[in-house]
Image (cartoon, helix red, strand yellow):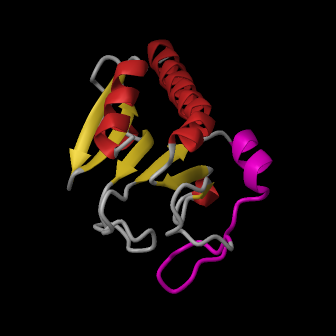
C-alpha cells in the first residue's frame, strides 16, 4: 500500500476526521464538527512523504514514506518500554533504532517521548499489525475531544 492508498484507507475507515496537508504530508485530526481551535488541532496519525521535517528516515528514496501514530502510554510501553529522553545534536531521540529501515515498527525519532510510533514504508503484514494502533489512536483522540466538549459545556 502506498502513501495515497493508506491515506484513503484511514479517511474511509474512521469517522470525524479532518485531513490537513502540508508539503505533501498528511495529518489526521479528530475534529467531527470542524471547529477545533488551532491550539487543539493535534493529529492522531500522520503520513510523511519527504525529508522536509527531518532526514533521519531517508524518505527521499522512491516510494518511501513514514506512517506515524500517537498511541497510548500503555501500548507504547508494552512495545518499547520506557520512552527515551536523550537526544542527539539534531534532536533525534536515542532509541537504538535505525530510523531509515523500512517495514519495521519503531519508536518515533522525535516524538517517542510522547508515545508516538512509526514505520517506514510498511508492508501489508506490518499494516495488519499497526491498524489496531491507528484505531486506538483514533479512539483516544475521540475520547479527548469528547472530554473537552463536556468540560466546555460545564463552563
Magenta-highlighted residues? 73-95
Q: Position of residue 22 (x, y in %)?
A: 22, 51
Q: Could you tell me residue 100's position as x and y percent?
A: 49, 69
Say whether residue 129 is left or right of residue 153. Answer: right
Count of numbered marks: 0
Comparing 39 with 42, the one in front is 42
The image position of residue 127, as x and y in percent, is 54, 39
In the picture as drawn, the residue positioned furthest to the left comes out as: 23
Q: Residue at x 50, y 76 (%)?
A: 91
At x 45% / y 48%, what residue is drawn? 67
**Main SS class of the magenta portion in the image:** loop
Occupied quadrant, residue 97: bottom right
Q: Is residue 19 above or below residue 3?
A: above
Q: Is residue 84 magenta?
A: yes
Tell me if residue 98 is in the magenta stretch: no
Q: Is residue 99 above or below residue 141?
A: below
Quadrant containing the N terminus in the rendered view: top left
Give the residue displayed 59% in from the left and 56% down from the top. Answer: 104
Furthest toward the bottom, the residue is 89
- Residue shown at the point (53%, 33%) measured from the top left: 134
- Residue 17 is drawn in which quadrant? top left
Whether residue 119 is situated above or below residue 143 in the rendered picture = below
Give the vertical position of 109 relative to 71 (above or below). Answer: below
- Residue 70: horizontal and vertical position, in percent? 55, 43
Amino acid at each position: 500500500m502506498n502513501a495515497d492508498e493508506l491515506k484513503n484507507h484511514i479517511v474511509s475507515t474512521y469517522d470525524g476526521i479532518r485531513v490537513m496537508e502540508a508539503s505533501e504530508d498528511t495529518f489526521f485530526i479528530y475534529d467531527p464538527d470542524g471547529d477545533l481551535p488551532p491550539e487543539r488541532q493535534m493529529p492522531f496519525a500522520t503520513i510523511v512523504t519527504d525529508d522536509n521535517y527531518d532526514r533521519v528516515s531517508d524518505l527521499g528514496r522512491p516510494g518511501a514514506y513514514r506512517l506515524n501514530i500517537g498511541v497510548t502510554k500503555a501500548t507504547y510501553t508494552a512495545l518499547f518500554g520506557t520512552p527515551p529522553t536523550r537526544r542527539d545534536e539534531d534532536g533525534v531521540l536515542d532509541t537504538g533504532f535505525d530510523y531509515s529501515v523500512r517495514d519495521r515498527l519503531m519508536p518515533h525519532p522525535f516524538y517517542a517521548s510522547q508515545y508516538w510510533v512509526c514505520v517506514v514504508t510498511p508492508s501489508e503484514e506490518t499494516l495488519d499489525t499497526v491498524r489496531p494502533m491507528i484505531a486506538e489512536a483514533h479512539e483516544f483522540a475521540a475520547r479527548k475531544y469528547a472530554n473537552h466538549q463536556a468540560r466546555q459545556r460545564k463552563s
